[in-house]
Image (cartoon, helix red, strand yellow):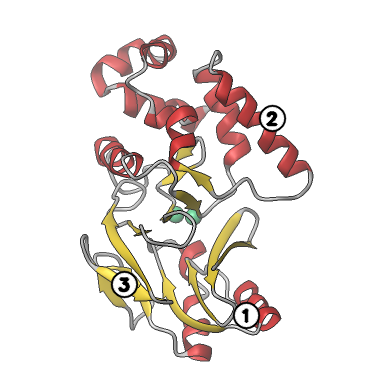
Amino acid sequence: MKLIPLPAFADNYIWMLHDGKNALVVDPGEAQPVFDALQMEGLQLQGILVTHHHADHTEGIDALREASGAPVFGPARESMPEPINRMVNGDCVRILNLNFNVLDVPGHTAGHIAFYCPTAEGNPILFCGDTLFSAGCGRLFEGTASQMQTSLQLLAQLPGSTRVCCAHEYTMANLQFAMEVEPDNDRLISYHRDCQELRMRGLPTLPSNIALERQINPFLRLEKTSIVQSIGRFDPTGCLQNGAFATLRQWKNQYR
Ligand code: ZN
Ligand code: FE
């Protein structure tokens, strides 16, 4: 099985998983990068997974479905290009002989879902859309801070080896902010160096993995006193009134 991020727009990734013959894609905001990859590798599209309703994740769906007849699996409670199979928490999608468990992860949007495959050859795979980014998390467009925090805690409990397939290459900007929040985290500093190197060579920083995110992602590390203190210095009142997570998200929103 090959797991490949297809670049789309300025900083999106459309994840493709294939076995040399059959493929699935996740969040095709554009159809063309998928058509190109299918043609280049001689692949048949067997399924389309969608995490949430934003246009940069959905606009390629109609063209891909029309050309391939592949079924689309998306969130039950969001408006989607019909027809789609509406998935809720606990549902399971079987494609390429793999089972993908559907997890509710509201926060970025109200009905955002993620797909988790525990049995992928190699290590488990998580397609988390715009919920969890490497060293960061999605903006709160429709959900609350508390919903997002619960969603991230759920994802953080997955096995450490789980490959984290985020839908955007936001890692460098997130790391800049993470180092501001937690300047003395050595793992964060070495990961920043590794990612800088990858980006200089034009390579993706993803997939990340859950174990690494637990070590470097400030949004998963609020049990650390030093992080809460750092958030308290940024906005003492906000931290008391709205909590550390909401204030951290607010801080990131206005950072630079
Ligand atoms: Zn989005
Ligand atoms: Fe997006």
Which numbered marker is on residue 220?
Answer: none
Query: According to the image, label 3 marks what residue?
Result: 93
Residue designated by label 2:
193
Q: Earlier in the sequence, mark 1 or mark 3?
A: 1
Q: Amino acid at mark 2?
A: Arg
From where the camera sits, is residue 152 visible?
A: yes
| Outermost residue to the right | 201
Q: Is residue 147 above or below residue 237?
A: below
Rounded to the nearest angstrom, the CA distance separating label 1 from label 3 is 21 Å
- Cα separation, mark 1 vs mark 2, equals 33 Å
> Disc 2 and disc 3: Cα gap in Å?
37 Å
Dividing the image into four equal quarters, which quarter contains ligand 1? bottom left
Q: Position of residue 208 (x, y in %)?
A: 53, 44
| Residue sitting at x 62%, y 53% | 11
The response on whether ligand 2 sits within 8 Å of label 2 is: no
Q: Nearer the viewer, residue 156 or 181?
A: 156
Residue 125 picture quarter = bottom left
Labelled disc at residue 38: 1
> Residue 205 location, x and y as percent?
62, 45
Q: Are marks 1 and 3 in contact (CB under 8 Å)?
A: no
Q: Viewed as shown, does residue 33 lie left or right of 67?
A: right
Give the residue displayed 69% in from the left and 30% down from the top. 193
Q: Is residue 130 left or right of residue 34?
A: left
Q: On the rendered image, what quadrant is the N terminus found in? A: bottom right
**Would you say 134 lies left or right of 225 here?**
right
Give the residue displayed 45% in from the left and 90% down from the top: 69
Left or right of residue 57: residue 196: right
